[in-house]
Amino acid sequence: IMNAFGLIQIGLILLCTTTTTSSLQCNHLPLQQRKVIENSLQLLDRMGKKFPQQCLREKKSFRFPEQVLKPRQKETVKIAIEEIFQHIFYIFSKNLTLAAWDGTALEQFQNGLYQQIEQLEACVIKKQTHYFRSKEVNRLKLKKYFQKIDCFLKDKQHNLCSWEISRAEMRRCLQLVDKVTRKL
Amino acid sequence: AGQTNLKSPQDIQVYVLNTNFTLRWNYTGNDTNVTFSAEYRFEDFETGETEWKELAGCQNVTRTECDFSSAITKYYDKHHVRIRAERREEVSPWSSIVEMTPYDIAQISPPGIELQSINGAIKIKVSPPEANQVQKMWIDCLSFKYNLVIWENSSNAEFRNRSIFPIDIIDDLAPDTTYCLKVQAIYPTDSKEGLFSPIRCVKTTHKAVNVLFCATNVSVIALNMKFHLHWNNKYKQHVSYNVQYLIGYLKKLYDDYSMKWLNVPGCENITDTQCNFSSIITATSGFFYLRVQAMSEYNKSCLSNEVKVDPLVTNEIGPPAVKVDISDVLLHIQISPPGGSENEVMRDHYDLSYRVLYWKNSSDNEEEIKTKEVKQTIGTISDLAPATLYCVKVQAFSKAYNKSSHFSKEECIKTPGDKILPLIILATFVTALFAVLLVATPLGFALYQAYNKIKYVFFPSCQPPLNIEGFGGQLFNSPFLSTTEEPIENCSIIETIITEEANQIDFKDYKHSKQSSRDSGNYSNDDDTSGSKVSEETLEKEIV
């Protein structure tokens, strides 16, 4: 119990520091986010060439849980977007030598995502845990989705086809986020 | 399954740390020779609930806790766990079911820390929880943020919290002092805070003698997306500089990024204390770190502090250019966006709007300044007073970024007024006059003619002379007037006789003349009535 109390205290301190920063520059977040996602989609295309025909048979359906982007509250959607960006950032930080993609485009892609993750973290106010519980099922589905992709890449030892399939999947994911961001 | 006096276990709790699952319970009954066994089942989103299965690691345990990490693999699914006591053949009833989703209750273990005391600062290297594990609860280790708590190892020490990167330097410390610290990992999107690492204490070294030729006061000045780095150096001679940059996200990774600093093109081996690094920045490129490496003639180098650049936030918006034009009482303003019309970046990423300030520039300076906000690069101001000098200045601003530029130069223009107005009035007057004349003259003329005709018809002013009247019909009879004159002898007209006779004849003549007017072309007098003969005679008389 003491442990928990201590954690809550630290949590409050952290929350205070995050809320003070969020009161500063968060107005530009929607505008910047739209631009970065637009740019990220372009970079994804630029990174590699057209989807190789031979990889078509290995194509797998991952089933992105679209309902995670549909809740009525803005804050919940923003947290979901932050999580999606984090997972994509993580996936693209892995061993990409076999993918043989354009390094500069990849760097810019990662840097853009990272900036958005930092902005969202500073600006989105995360309320108490009870606020989350009702939406947790969707977020767990989201984690499962990315876990599937991670496992898929590991199983295929990060070969070219597995990377190309993942890239196409991430592109689709970002497009869904793009649609939602325009409505926010 | 015989008679059971055995009580079921109580207060069952599941404790999860990373992927280590521990089941704990209380047993209030007689616990001699009692063992416990647990069962579990899980609920998959797709397949639904499974059957109860034996919980590996929690079979026939004698203590009131067991480790069942090997049994659980589906961390995102809901699990049910129950346990019962056993003694030889006796089994207790199943305990109440504990429902849990592993991920939700899992706690983050402390991260690993490596410390190094260098030059009055502490270099810290953090390794993530589950660093070398194959099976992970926290698959995405890059999402961790690390919270450092540091304090001086003295009484009444202040605890300071700060967020650190996996590889970071804590340099706002006093030299030769012992500091204690602890770090926890946080998973931001889940608002999960991990356990703190054990407290570590380290003593800072003394700060090395301030290297003279290091670059100091490194700052960024950016205008219209042109980025310049400026710095100072007390030691002016024989120092060359290398400006380096680091792509922001590299600090988030666990790899050592010290080898990943790159030279800014065009700022290698320079002697100037400034650098234009616009070539590496674009509006959507994210964060960058910049530093200056100073090199002395003795091949010694010194690195400056780092500066973080967030392009659109660091950049300042320059003033726009303004052109004014006047037409009647409308003032047209043409705005050239900052950075030029070809620079789409500013407009695109800042979503620029313009604030137009305009005022009357008259001798008394009490004129109020009016404002108008426009989104396009063309604006119009109406409701202006004529013959007044108006001045305009424009400021570009971004509502989203809460940034505004300086004002543009003032542009003044005078609204058309006195000079033209009298001319207009005169012109209008003259035209009107002309128009009136144009219409009035023929009208007047026409009226005059009409008047004349009417007057002529009803009130003829031209009376034939009385003597001619006496001749009456004869002369007027014949339309054919003889031009040959009768020889005129001395004769005089006896007015008095004629007048009497004329009076008598007057009416007759009148009648006759009426009659004769019917005749046409005939000048024979054979048809004449007696009256006419009489008149002939009288005429002859007169002539003679």
Image (spheres, coloured by chain):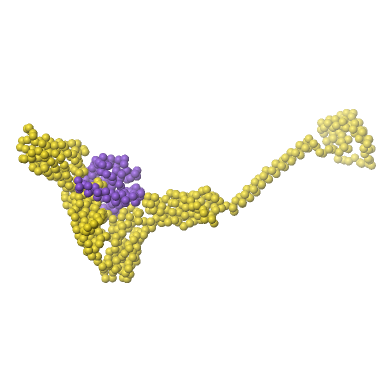
From the rendered image, report the letter of the chain displayed in purple: A
Residue B9 showing in the rendered view: yes
Task: Tell me: B331 left or right of A97.
Answer: right
Quarter placement of the C terminus of chain B: top right
Task: Tell me: B384 left or right of A45.
Answer: right
Give coordinates of residue B523: x percent, y percent: 85, 33
Q: Nearer the viewer, residue A159 or A117?
A: A117
Count of number-bearing discs? 0
Residue A149 showing in the rendered view: no
Question: Which residue is rendered at x = 23% and y = 42% of the image?
Answer: A140
Give coordinates of residue B449: x percent, y percent: 74, 40
Task: Tell me: B34 left or right of B439.
Answer: left
Question: Which residue is rendered at x = 65% and y = 45% of the image?
Answer: B435
Question: Which residue is rendered at x = 12% and y = 44% of the image?
Answer: B66
Question: Which residue is rendered at x = 52% and y = 54% of the image?
Answer: B366
Give coordinates of residue B441: x percent, y percent: 70, 44
Residue B165 in which image quadrant? bottom left
Q: Nearer the viewer, residue B464 or A19?
A: A19
From the rendered image, report the letter of the chain displayed in yellow: B
Q: Residue furthest front?
A: B155
Give coordinates of residue B539: x percent, y percent: 91, 35
Quarter placement of the N terminus of chain B: top left
